[in-house]
Image: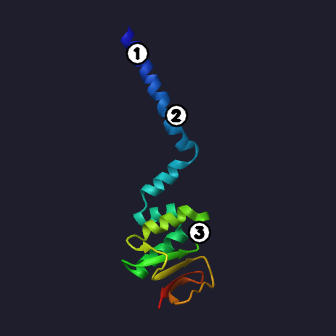
Amino acid sequence: MWKTVFRITLAIWIFIWALFLVRPYFKKGLCREYSALLASSLDEKRAYVTGKELYDFVRFCGDSIGAPSSYRIIGLEKEDQIKYVRAVYYLYPNIDKADPEFLLVYKRTGVSRGGYHLFKALAQDKYILRKT
């Protein structure tokens, strides 16, 4: 008798906890997002997490400057700390330095520094300056 009561109580307890664990995914619509992420490629997942515009810029920079190089990102300041960290992560093995070979300009127009010239441009406000 006690075994039966214990099993029924355990089954009900497991069922209730399963509802608590699964309910938020359906209530907030996260199942659609997770299923879309499961069907996505690695680049699409990275673009989803980072933001498509920033990820396209980082890929453009990584393909353009080659490895190993030194760079400094202009346009991702302290208010965009997580975006900056993600960009540095995706640009590895290139190194972020104070006196870089390349200046990666993101969402800024008219940036010019002495000793640097335009190397490549993705858009008017997204471009790479190279040290001469």
The vertical placement of 103 against 7, above or below, is: below
CA distance separating discs 1 and 3: 59 Å
Indicate the position of residue 107 as horizontal and vertical percent values: 60, 76
Circle 1: element type? helix
Q: State which mark lies toward you, 2 or 3.
A: 3
Circle 2: element type? helix
Q: State which mark lies toward you, 1 or 3.
A: 3
- The crowd level at tag 2 (other Cα within 10 Å; few <14, some 14-19, many 20+) is few
- Colour convention: rainbow
CA distance separating discs 2 and 1: 21 Å
Front position in the image: 66 or 74: 74
Amino acid type assigned to the residue bearing label 1 in the image: Phe
Which residue carries the number 2 mark?
20
Amino acid type assigned to the residue bearing label 3 in the image: Glu
Which residue carries the number 3 mark?
77
Picture disc at residue 88: none
Front position in the image: 72 or 36: 72
Picture disc at residue 6: 1
Residue furthest to the top in view is 1
Indicate the position of residue 95 as horizontal and vertical percent values: 42, 73
Residue 47 visible somewhere in the drawing: no
Q: Residue visible at 46% across and 53% down? A: 35
